[in-house]
């Protein structure tokens, strides 16, 4: 089984140096595009590969690039940003790529920057990834030294500078327009779209923001072609995917596997099955802002299409398991506490609605819930849904809530009727501060 | 007053962006690195230096979780309170820290050694529960390990 993105990553071992990386074929894609391909060729190839954004939205990467104005008339400088602000709760896949093989990311960034004719690039890294920061700085120095970055790369006439920017902590920074505001030294509020960042992004110039895993796919697509990339998958969605599992399984972790590996295989073969004494109750397939899936969904392939058809989203592909001994109300309350806290406060439904939801869930979890509370929660899942808020944060927050109300409604009702949490001995959530 | 070294570092950040204001977060990070936090006085110094009003800069400073507008201890403990750590029982770690340090979230020990703060997902969910002290990450935490971990920080 091919694992292009993680083939040179060995847990516990330092990432490959530039020399070692070159020895296993590193930076070949840069040599190839600079010598043989025009930016439009790179865009076409990536479009044909069906690579979809690995940050969660799943938009076709080549198509996203195609909205960037090209040619001598286009505004300059253009920017490419690597979104390494991995803050979706339950998500730890980009950390693996950043700490394990930073040269692969840099190589992918050169490919992407060349495809859109960008001359300045940022890696927006979350502050908590200290090891990644150290390794990226080392790798950037080596890449500059070898002439893969800077002026006139390998004598091609193409120039690119990459800067590492470490954030100061806020979930909103993962949203691409909010990320751009953070890079500009502003509050990370999202921006109105249009204009889209592809046309007017960082400092008002054309900008592409791509996820780390997405960028890491690019060298391999350039080297091996679109058909090869599609062939890596078990289903219609192309490539491999970094999947992860956290929660009460025997061997939680992160693995690169063919796109479309089933949920059951992920949990049972890679996660080692549930821990002894714990039963599976549900899961969030791709981070905190995705809808619950349950037993009936276990044989679904984990890809964009199948998970969406089941009413959820693959999101980041790192799943969080809910076991039978963990209270679903407490679980969802923890999520809503996070979202309420991380709301940027810019738009009213999100700023006011999420704390309301959080308080109701806390009341229910403490046994102080009333039957009408469930209707208020139902109301919020509609009015904080897509189209009613300025960005995707609140709609994302409603995904686990609406599906919990659907699949675990009896558990909510039991809290209300019995005036206490049936799991209370196992777990009582207390809010921070 | 900003020191010559701080000004030097801030000037470098300003040189990388179109307008000095765009470097304000970097400037706050630089000041926080030397003082541990950003006082009202430091905030005004930075605002003057990059050409913003103090109010505008404070709206940026207070937006971000890791810019401290109140003094912190010599070491900051950031305990992950997000979903995977909750499932794996981080509250036991929290309660033990409360008890051991005799502080709650947002507080600093009397000797100025530790500040304890809750933190969003640290991105190491397969090895929950997790916390960070300064730049160091600790995972697969158990209550029993806490004494040994805390001892490393004086």
Image (cartoon, coloured by chain):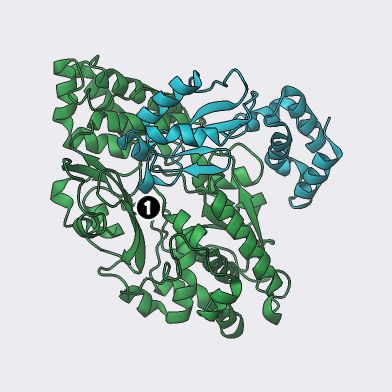
Which part of the image, by quadrant, shows the N terminus of chain A? bottom left
Q: Can you say whether A77 is above or below A376 in the image?
A: below
* Chain ID, cyan in image: B
Q: x%, y% of residue A376?
A: 27, 22
- The residue at 71%/43% (across/down) is B22
Chain identifier of the residue bearing label 1 in the image: A
Residue pushed farthest right? B4
Q: Can you say whether A330 is above or below A20 in the image?
A: above
Residue pushed farthest bottom? A36
Q: x%, y% of residue A168?
A: 59, 40
Residue B37, can we see it?
yes
- The picture quadrant where one finds residue A373 is top left
Question: Does residue B145 appear left or right of residue A332 in this picture?
Answer: right
Chain A in the picture: what colour?
green
* Circle 1 residue: A316
- The picture quadrant where one finds residue A425 is top left
Q: Residues within 10 Å of mark 1 (few under 14, many from 20)?
A: many
Residue A39, can we see it?
no
Question: Does residue A418 appear left or right of residue A29 in this picture?
Answer: left
- How many numbered badges does the structure rendering display? 1
Disc 1 element:
loop
Depth check, front residue: A21 or A217: A21
Q: Can you say whether A258 is above or below A176 in the image?
A: below
Q: x%, y% of residue A326?
A: 23, 33
């Amino acid at each position: 089984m091919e694992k292009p993105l993680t083939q040179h990553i060995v847990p516990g071992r330092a990432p490959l140096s530039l020399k070692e990386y070159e020895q296993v074929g590193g930076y070949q894609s840069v040599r190839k595009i600079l010598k043989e391909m025009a930016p439009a060729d790179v865009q076409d190839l990536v479009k044909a590969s069906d690579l979809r954004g690995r940050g969660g939205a799943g938009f076709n990467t080549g198509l996203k690039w195609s909205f960037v104005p090209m040619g001598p008339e286009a505004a300059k400088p253009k920017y490419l940003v690597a979104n390494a602000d991995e803050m979706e709760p339950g998500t730890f896949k980009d950390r693996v790529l950043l700490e394990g093989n930073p040269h692969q990311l840099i190589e992918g960034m050169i490919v992407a920057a060349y495809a859109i004719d960008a001359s300045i690039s940022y890696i927006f890294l979350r502050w908590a990834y200290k090891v990644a920061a150290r390794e990226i700085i080392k790798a950037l120095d080596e890449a500059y030294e070898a002439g893969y970055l800077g002026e006139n790369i390998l004598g091609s006439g193409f120039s690119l500078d990459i800067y590492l920017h470490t954030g100061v902590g806020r979930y909103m920074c993962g949203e691409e327009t909010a990320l751009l505001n953070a890079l500009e030294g502003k509050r990370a509020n999202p921006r109105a779209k249009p204009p889209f960042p592809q046309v007017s992004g960082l400092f008002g110039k054309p900008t592409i923001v791509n996820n780390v895993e997405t960028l890491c796919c690019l060298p391999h697509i350039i080297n091996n072609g679109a058909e090869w990339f599609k062939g890596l998958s078990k289903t219609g969605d192309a490539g491999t995917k970094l999947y992860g599992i956290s929660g009460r399984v025997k061997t939680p972790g992160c693995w690169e596997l063919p796109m479309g590996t089933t949920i059951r295989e992920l949990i049972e073969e890679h996660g080692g099955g549930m821990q002894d004494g714990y039963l599976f109750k549900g899961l969030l397939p791709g981070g905190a802002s995705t809808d619950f899936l349950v037993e009936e969904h276990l044989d679904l392939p984990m890809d964009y299409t199948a998970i969406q058809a089941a009413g959820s989203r693959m999101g980041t592909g790192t799943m969080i398991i809910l076991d039978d001994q963990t209270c679903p109300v407490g679980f969802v309350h923890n999520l809503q506490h996070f979202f309420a806290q991380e709301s940027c406060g810019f738009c009213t439904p999100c700023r006011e609605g999420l704390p309301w939801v959080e308080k109701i869930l806390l009341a229910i979890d403490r046994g102080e819930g009333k039957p009408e509370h469930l209707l208020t929660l139902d109301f919020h899942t509609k009015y904080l849904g897509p189209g009613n808020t300025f960005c995707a944060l609140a709609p994302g927050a409603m995904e686990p809530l609406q599906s919990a109300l659907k699949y675990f409604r009896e558990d909510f009702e039991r809290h209300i009727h019995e005036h206490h949490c049936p799991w209370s001995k196992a777990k009582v959530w207390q809010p921070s501060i | 007053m900003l020191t010559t070294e701080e000004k030097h570092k801030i000037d470098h950040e300003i040189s990388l962006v179109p307008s000095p204001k765009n470097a304000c977060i970097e400037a706050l990070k630089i000041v926080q690195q030397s003082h541990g936090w950003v006082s009202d006085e430091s905030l005004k110094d930075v605002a003057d230096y990059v050409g913003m009003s103090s109010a505008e800069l404070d709206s940026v400073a207070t937006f971000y979780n890791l810019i401290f507008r109140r003094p912190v201890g010599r070491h900051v403990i950031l305990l992950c309170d997000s979903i995977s750590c909750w499932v794996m029982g981080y509250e036991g770690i929290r309660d033990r820290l409360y008890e051991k340090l005799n502080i709650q979230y947002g507080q600093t020990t009397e000797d100025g050694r530790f500040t304890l703060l809750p933190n969003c997902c640290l991105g190491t969910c397969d090895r929950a529960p997790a916390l960070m002290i300064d730049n160091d990450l600790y995972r697969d935490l158990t209550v029993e390990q806490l004494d040994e971990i805390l001892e490393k920080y004086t």
